[in-house]
Each structure stands twice: as C-alpha cells, then as structure tokens.
Image (tube, rainbow, N blue to C red):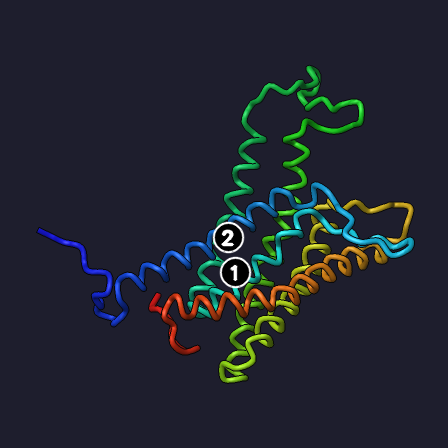
Amino acid sequence: MQTELPSQVAIPDGVPEDIRRRREVVFLVLSGLFLGTLGMLNILGISRFVTLATWGNVAVTVAVGVLPYPLTFLCTDLISELYGKERANQVVWVGLLLNLWVLFIVWLGGVLPGFEATDPATGELIRDAAGRLPVFFEIRNLTFGAVTASMVAYLTAQFVDVYLFHFWKDLTNGKHLWLRNNGSTLLSQLVDTVSVVMITHFLAGALPIDDGQALWPQLIRFIGYGYLFKLVAALLDTGPFYLCVFWLSHYLHFESPTTRPKP
C-alpha cells in the first residue's frame, strides 16, 4: 500500500516535497496572472481610449488594453529570476497559443449563424442608426486588429525582455537586480509599443486616426503616450519586484541567485 511522503522527505534531486509543491504553485500563479492578463488585454484591446493625465491642451491617452500590460513583464521577470530563462520562454510560447485560441473563438463566433437582423437582398448584417454593427461584430473587428498586432509585438517584446534580462544578469554576475528588471522591461516595451501602433494602423486600420490631421504626428503621439505609461509603470514596479524576489527566494528556498528548480 502506497503512502504519502512526509513533507520534509527529500526527493532524488534533494528538494523536499513540500518545497517542490511551493515552487509549482508559485509558478502556476505567476503563469496564470501572465496568461489571464494577456487574454484580458487582447479582448479589451483598443475598444476604448482613456485619458490618464492632462497638461494644458495636451491629453495623455492610451488604449484600455494597455492598462494591465505592465503586469505581464513583471510576471516574466519574476519567472526569469526564480525559474530561469527556459521556463520564462515556455510561458511566452503558451501566451502565443492563447492569442491564437482567442482569435479562433472570435472567428468561430462570427461565422456560426446567429439571430442578428440581416439585409434580405445581400445577407449582410444591418447596421444601427449610428452605422455600427451588432456589438459582437464590433468587438470582433477590434479584436482581430488588436490581437494580430499584439501577437507580432508580443513575441518580439517578450523574447527581447527575457533575453535582455539574462544578458544584464550575466553581465553583472547576478548583481544589480534593478538594472536587469528595468533595463530589460523598458527596452522591450519600447519595441512592443512601436510594433503594436504600427501594425494596428497599417495592417488592421483600427486606430482612431483623424483624417483631417497629418498621420505621423498622430502615430508618434500614440507611441509616445503608450510608452510613457509603460515606462512609469515599469519604474514603479521596481519596488514590488525587489520585495517579491526577496520574499519568494526565501519562501521557495532558493538560497543563492544561481539556485534554480529543475524544469
């Protein structure tokens, strides 16, 4: 008859069973936060733009989908620090699959027959008095544009983040935690912001561009405002990042910066 191991019995790799469980749970929590936030921001995407601050006649506006995005970089930085580069890259790839899953469900929901009113002559959906499609199809069009843009930008930015994180870590021999946290995040989010804005406009045509004004100043404002928000968020997460690494390193029994659980 098989019995459970006592909580402090060491398994073959020398890690007690209860510590291994802790590491698995923390990894699942960080991965869940990362993937849940990613799914949420892709659905919300550019469905609404909000004003974060106003200086005189200048209003700093960002897409509502950008608001939770800095959390994804905090999660991958924590996974990189605690579990290593390989585990962080695995989560990034799962995030790509999540993006594809979102696209598939949104596509499927649009091709299956529904109860919306259609034009008997053309079979096309009837728009309301404001010229808008039924709510789902408005969301569907925005989601296709936002997710297509974010998939390209997401893969580029997240892999840049993980690579730079370990580049700075190797360069400083594991010292200066603030440098690898901020250095990797700030550069990767610049890549992400530029990619998302450019792809969302030129590929999906989903940005609220005013045709009466010059195009490039508007695109530069979208990039600038989005990156400014991410930059401030990245700097503000330095404190929480230090606290999480300090507490989790003890809680998970990572005695030194080089101690990592086996994948």
Q: Residues within 10 Å of mark 2 (few under 14, many from 20)?
A: some
Where is the C terminus found, in terms of image quarters?
Answer: bottom left
List the residue tagged with mark 2: 33
For mark 1, give the secondary structure: helix
- State the residue at coordinates (56%, 50%): 38
Give yes or no for contact between labels 2 and 1 (Cβ–Cβ under 8 Å): yes
Does 77 appear above or below 102?
Answer: below
Is residue 85 shown above or below 206?
Answer: below
| Closer to the camera in the image, 247 or 138 | 247
In the rendered image, residue 105, in percent from the top left (x then y), is placed at 52, 37
Real-space CA distance between mark 2 and mark 1, rounded to the nearest whole angstrom: 7 Å
The residue nearer to you, when weighing 203 against 76, is: 76
The answer to whether residue 246 is left or right of residue 53 is left
> Which residue type does callout 2 highlight?
Leu
Q: Which mark is residue 75?
A: 1
Residue 204 percent coordinates (x, y): 70, 46
